[in-house]
Image: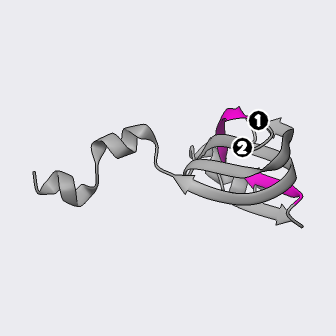
Amino acid sequence: MTTELQQNKHKGTAENSILIKERKLLELHGVLRLEDFDKEQVNLDTTLGRLVVRGRNLHVAQLLLEQGELSVEGEIDSLSFEETAAAKKRGSLLHRLTK
């Protein structure tokens, strides 16, 4: 019996979920690529877009790209989905339609 997550992976989409435990552990599903990281910031691409994790003493505890999973440990201050440079360059749909 296959799970919904396994079915989604076969279709080319992965479940995207975020779990934060006491601001000390972050578990992500739906990770496509780890862009870069240091002790204060982790930049990654997910199935829902670019995600930036900010905090202190951050380190990547586990990375399983085949499963789309990432764990970050440290003091987590914020998470934000941000536009990529390509998306900013394209502009909004309304702007493109009114050109």
- The region drawn magenta spans 24-38
Mark linked to residue 41: 2
Give left or right: position of 46 versus 23.
left
- Measuring from the top left, give residue 31's x and y in whole percent: 67, 44
Q: Secondary structure at mark 1?
A: loop
- Quarter holding residue 65: top right
Give left or right: position of 60 versus 54.
right
Give left or right: position of 11 versus 53.
left
- Measuring from the top left, give residue 93's x and y in whole percent: 25, 56
Report whether residue 6 is seen: no
Viewer-closest of 79 and 17:
79
- Near mark 2 (Cα within 10 A), the count class, few <14, some 14-19 or many ≥20, is many
Q: Which residue does the image show at 60% across and 57% down from the upper left?
A: 80
**Is residue 78 highlighted in magenta?**
no
Q: Secondary structure at mark 2?
A: strand
Report whether residue 98 is seen: yes
Instruction: Name the residue furthest bottom.
Output: 22
Q: Which residue does the image show at 61% across and 49% down from the upper left?
A: 51
Tell how many labels. 2
- Near mark 1 (Cα within 10 A), the count class, few <14, some 14-19 or many ≥20, is some
- Measuring from the top left, give residue 56's x and y in whole percent: 82, 49
Instruction: Name the residue furthest left.
Output: 99
- Measuring from the top left, give residue 36's x and y in whole percent: 68, 32
Mark linked to residue 38: 1
Q: Is residue 65 above or below residue 72?
A: above
Q: What is the spatial separation of the Cα atoms under label 1 and label 2, in whole angstroms?
A: 5 Å
Q: Is residue 55 above or below residue 34?
A: below
Q: Which residue does the image show at 57% across and 43% down from the upper left?
A: 12
**Is residue 30 highlighted in magenta?**
yes
Residue contact at pointers 1 and 2, CB within 8 angstroms: yes
Amino acid, disc 2: Gln
